[in-house]
Image: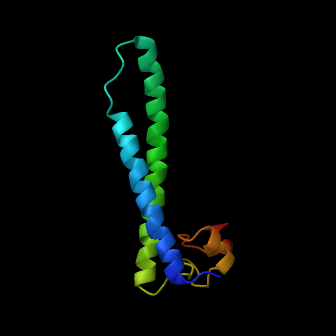
């Protein structure tokens, strides 16, 4: 069983990873397009994939930031819907989860 401090540290480290990944995605999307038409089509497809990954990273970042807000407010580990305690096992796997297993399903 991990402490709230350990989970908070893990979430803050993940935020740093996500930020670095999002910057790499931005850099890749900002690259000058290839003058070759066929290569541009591939780059466009790759760009769409990168945008999807960036959106997923932003969503995860928001979830972590919300969880850190709950830590600061003393509400971390409790379901935002029903108020029940979120299981330790669930928090070990998904430390930023806002909901208990019952409300999440």
Q: Is residue 65 visible?
A: yes
Q: Is residue 46 above or below residue 41?
A: below
Image quarter hosting the C terminus:
bottom right
Picture mark count: 0
Instruction: Point out residue 25 in the picture as x, y percentages from the top left corner.
Output: 40, 42
Image position, residue 6 (x, y; %):
53, 78
Residue situated furthest bottom in the rendering: 74
Left or right of 51: which side holds 92? right
Q: Which residue is painted at 43% across and 75% down in the image?
A: 68
Left or right: residue 87 versus residue 40 is right
Figure check: 23 above or below 66: above
Q: Relative to 8, is 35 on the left or the right?
A: left
Task: Evaluate whether residue 103 shows in this view.
Answer: no
Residue 10 spot, x, y in % from top left: 51, 70
32 and 98: which is toward the camera: 32
Image quadrant where one finds the N terminus: bottom right
Residue at 35% x, 41% y is 26
Q: Residue at x 33, y 30 (%)?
A: 31
């Amino acid at each position: 069983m991990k402490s709230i401090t350990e989970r908070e540290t893990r979430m803050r480290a993940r935020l740093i990873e996500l930020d670095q990944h999002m910057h790499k995605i931005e850099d890749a999307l900002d690259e000058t397009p290839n003058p070759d038409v066929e290569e541009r089509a591939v780059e466009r497809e790759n760009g769409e994939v990168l945008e999807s990954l960036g959106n997923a990273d932003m969503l995860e970042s928001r979830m972590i930031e919300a969880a850190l807000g709950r830590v600061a407010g003393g509400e971390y580990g409790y379901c935002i819907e029903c108020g029940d305690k979120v299981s330790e096992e669930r928090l070990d796997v998904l430390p930023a989860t806002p909901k208990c297993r019952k409300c999440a399903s």
